Image (cartoon, rainbow, N blue to C red):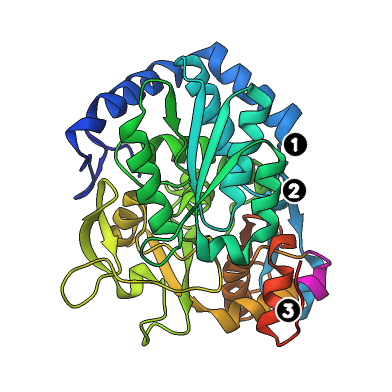
Amino acid sequence: MTNSPTSRGRFGIHGGQYIPETLMNAVIELEEAYDRYKADPAFNAELTELFNSYAGRPSLLYFAANMTADLGGAKVYLKREDLNHTGAHKINNVLGQALLAKKMGKTRLIAETGAGQHGVATATAAALMGMECVVYMGVEDMERQALNVYRMRLLGTEVRGVSAGTGTLKDAVSETFREWTNRIDDTHYCLGSVMGPHPFPTMVRDFQAVISREARAQILEAEGKLPDAVLACVGGGSNAIGSFYHFIGDEGVRLIGCEAAGRGIDTWETAATMSTGKLGIFHGMKSYFCQDEYGQIAPVYSISAGLDYPGVGPEHAMLHDSGRAEYVPVTDEEAVCAFEYLSRTEGVIPAIESAHAVAHAIKIAPTMDTEQVIIVTLSGRGDKDVAAIARYRGEDLHE
């Protein structure tokens, strides 16, 4: 099974280009440029060099021996995207898009960010490549991710707070699209996930697919076989689709996306799109979205700023429809417990986003045979989350 989109980026019924006419020229220009450069050996060699010499790839596939022994079931391996430069998987996509933007003659990058990791990665690439950079971030997220706001400003990026709506990721995306509409000549929108209008879901997927390309080769070398399951957290879904992509054709490998259930899928305080969402159109794509009783995009909640997006990328929606991938809700409490568990057990502090996948691994590993193998993608490191988790546990800790 392969997941090549049809014309205008359709994944089954999902995807497409639902955008105002004022953006069509920019999107067409981007699509044509990506189609040209993705097959260009010189472009790919330059990107690979950036991955290896700047971002620190390949990332480790680490056997979590303590966790495996403690859980008493399947072997658990961690794909360590937290070890990348800037501390998350986001740098994979950003280096690809920034390099492409330079080839297109753009001098300015704009981006949205939730937890701040995509914003930091974009600011980093802009500094490296001598480009101007503006990042939009919800004011709610700016407060709970103050460290990343300072990092972006330190890198020379202007961070603009977005107070509209819920002041979180969806509102930052909306504001960034609005800015792009007003200034397309010199500006590239470096979108951070596998969402939005075509070609973004495909392009971001392709840049993030380095995760599963490496993991597939690494697990074959380590175990002599493919994994029984691959787990990754899902907001918009870039690290998950990157983790899944090179395993999609291997039907014996379960693909499990772990969504942010917040305070529970039976409450309004959730961001678990696959569990609670409905088909809709938003941010330039058709997919599943959390909606209220009137069909409007619903406010969502998660302890994780990076997962509190009310939709999911169209390729994930297709994988859900076909049954090729499973999507499970994980609550705040389960994620926080997993955050603390992995820190104590393996000496690895994961991002709270990644902890959602760790939580589900803790749940399913003991039910599996000791010869079976799980890969869990650690999408990022948890330094940014320590103060927030401390406050969640009742300790008055501030950066």
Position of 340 relative to 98 (above/below): below
Q: Position of residue 256 (x, y in %)?
A: 48, 64
Residue identified by numbered label 3? 390
Q: In which quarter of the image is residue 26?
A: top left
Badge 1 or badge 2: first in the primary sequence = 1
Residue type, numbered disc 2: Leu
Q: Where is residue 139 in the image (x, y as percent from the top left)?
A: 51, 61
Q: Which of marks 2 and 3 is in front?
A: 3
Q: What element carries label 3?
A: helix
| Residue closest to the eye, 147 or 254 | 147
Q: Alpha carbon of mark 1 to alpha carbon of mark 3: how far?
A: 30 Å
Q: What element carries label 2?
A: helix
| Mark 2 surroundings within 10 Å by alpha-carbon count, few (fewer than 14), some (14 through 19), many (20 or more) | many
Q: Residue at horizontal 61%, vertical 50%?
A: 117
Residues tagged 1 and 2 counted as in contact (Cβ below 8 A):
yes
Badge 1 or badge 3: first in the primary sequence = 1
Position of 9 relative to 328 (above/below): above
Quadrant containing the N terminus is top left
What's the mark number on residue 83? Answer: 2
Q: Is mark 1 on a helix, strand or loop?
A: loop
Residue identified by numbered label 1? 56
Left or right placement of residue 148 versus residue 209 in this view: right
Residue type, numbered disc 3: Ala
Residue type, numbered disc 1: Gly
Image: magenta residue range: 343-348
